[in-house]
Amino acid sequence: MVETFKTLYLGVVASGAYSEVRWTPDRDIIIRKGLFNERDDKSLNNVQAYISIADVPYTKDYVSARVVGQTLEYCWKPNLPVPKGATIYVKVVNGRADSINLDVSFVYE
């Protein structure tokens, strides 16, 4: 099956602030990969990420966004079936001293 990319823009997140996004697929999918992209190539070591899919938390309590990954080769690979209509929720909290400009991307089929 063909893999498709879905990118959700979390925006510019100021130091100490948070941002959250939700996506509801319009068909059954399988999430193959998930990763973060900081548009200015800043480190994500001090950025907390929360990920919940179909009301199941996959970060307990949170994970460094760096651990989720920033490249397709080294990223989260859940191979997770997600039914049509389920909500994919991502929240980040910026613990850095400066702002970040962040996307979260999923590769699915």
Image: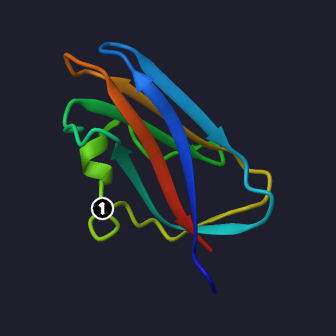
Secondary structure, mark 1, is loop
Q: Can residue 61 be seen in this view?
A: no
Going by the image, does 29 lie left or right of 43? right
Q: Position of residue 108 (x, y in %)?
A: 58, 68
Q: In which quarter of the image is residue 65?
A: top left
Mark 1: amino acid: Thr
Between 68 and 4, which is closer to the camera in this rendering? Answer: 4
Residue 76 x/y as whole percent: 37, 60
From what the image shows, is residue 75 above or below residue 103? below
Residue 71 percent across, percent down from the top left: 30, 61
Name which residue lies at 52% across and 66% down.
107
Looking at the picture, tell me which residue is in the foreground, 36 or 68.
Answer: 36
Q: Can residue 78 be seen in this view?
A: yes
Point out the image quarter for the N terminus.
Answer: bottom right
The residue singled out by tag 1 in the image is: 71
What residue do we see at 21% from left, 30% from top?
46
Residue at image position (48%, 29%) is: 11
The image position of residue 78, as x and y in percent, is: 45, 65
- Quadrant location, the C terminus: bottom right
Who's the residue at 36% across and 47% down the image? 37
Given residues 38 and 18, the one toward you in this image is 38
Query: Is 84 on the left-hand or right-hand side of 4?
Result: right
The mark tally for this picture is 1
Which quadrant would residue 27 be assigned to in this image? bottom right
| Dot 1 alpha-carbon crowd within 10 angstroms: few under 14, some 14 to 19, many 20 or more | few
